[in-house]
Amino acid sequence: MSDEKIPPIVSPPTRAPQAAVPPVRPDRVGRASDADERDRRSREAPPRYLKDNDTPFALAWRVLTSRYRSMRDKAGRDFMRRTLRIGISARIFHPEPGATGLRSKNLQYLEESIAQWVMSRDVLVFMIPTVNTSGLLHPSNITLRHYARHLDGLVLQGGADVSPQTYSEAATRPEWSGDRARDLYELELLHEFVDAGKPVLGICRGCQLINVGFGGTLYQDIASDVEGASAHVNDLYDRHRHTIVFPKGSTLAGLFPKAGEALVNSIHHQSVKDLGRDITVEAYSHGDNIVEAIRYQRARFVMGLQWHPEFHSAGGVELLDCTPILDNFLRAARETRF
């Protein structure tokens, strides 16, 4: 036998069976490429909501004007939502001779009803204290002008008599000498707010002070000075009432067009006598023609009411609902806040 080796027989490699490829239907030939083309065109095409003649400049202009309107509307909403800040003058309690404790001190305070009446229209109320830049204990550079600058309006509340000395007269009786210190403080407040263009609403004493502040005078006591006058104050206090009349063409006649006259409380023994400069009558009492409301004509809103509107209920049917007066005052405060 020969030593030559016989090579092994190698079988050819086996191939994995291939899946049968379905034949392409003639009606689907070219459809894939058409879909790709449509996708490409839709990506490149502008949105359907645009107009055919829209240009980049026109779109940019519309975007800018839209942003401007949005910012303007937001600023308007913020402006309208900012809470008004209304100052109320302080009543002053002077130390009693020989008293000790709290009654030996100067006290400044608010009558609760006047603050709550103003706050009923969702505004902030601040009592404005007297200021003393030369105080020995606590001197300050703050003046009443700062309050007029930072507050939106002023209410002069009722209280002690206006001193006859303030309108260059002498008191006919000692008990009618009034509060000269408070007069000087509130007169400065009045003129600072008027000079700042801010509205002022005077209540009872505040009405009288506005008249005196512009050169007018007062009856020191209605019962003594006005013959045949009705009683304007008695022991019933705020339950004492009488009728007032609104002159035609007055601001109050415009606020209460269906009224003509109204029932109000009456808690005053002093009243306006000679009108001050540019002061007009807004209401007078029925029967004796005592001045019951005034307005200073050279300002947007400076008005005085001789009655106490804070003692009238909102929506009341018997006593005059004075909410329109308060709203008119607050609208003037918003308009002049800048």
Image: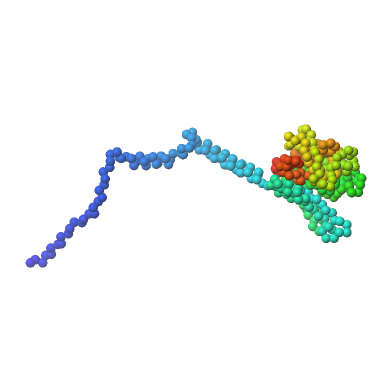
Numbered marks: total: 0
Q: Residue at x 25, y 51 (%)?
A: 18
How far across and how far down the image is residue 188, in percent? 81, 46
Q: Could you say which quadrant of the image residue 72 lies in?
A: top right
Q: Is residue 300 above or below residue 126?
A: above
182 or 41, nearer to the observer:
182
- In the displayed structure image, the side of residue 18 where residue 31 appears, left or right: right
Q: Could you say which quadrant of the image residue 219 lies in?
A: top right
How far across and how far down the image is residue 95, in percent? 85, 56
How far across and how far down the image is residue 167, in percent? 87, 43
| Residue lying farthest to the left in this orientation | 1
Question: Residue 51, can we see it?
Answer: yes
Task: State which quarter of the image contains the N terminus.
Answer: bottom left
- In the displayed structure image, the side of residue 174 where residue 113 appears, left or right: left
Question: Residue 212, can we see it?
Answer: no
Q: Residue at x 90, y 42 (%)?
A: 224
**How are the colours assigned in the image?**
rainbow
Q: Residue at x 72, y 43 (%)?
A: 314
How far across and how far down the image is residue 329, in percent? 73, 42
| Residue lying farthest to the top in this orientation | 248
Q: Could you say which quadrant of the image residue 263 lies in?
A: top right
69 or 296, nearer to the observer:
296
Q: Is residue 105 above or below residue 291?
A: below
88 or 297, nearer to the observer:
88
Q: Is residue 12 above or below residue 230?
A: below
Task: State which quarter of the image contains the C terminus.
Answer: top right
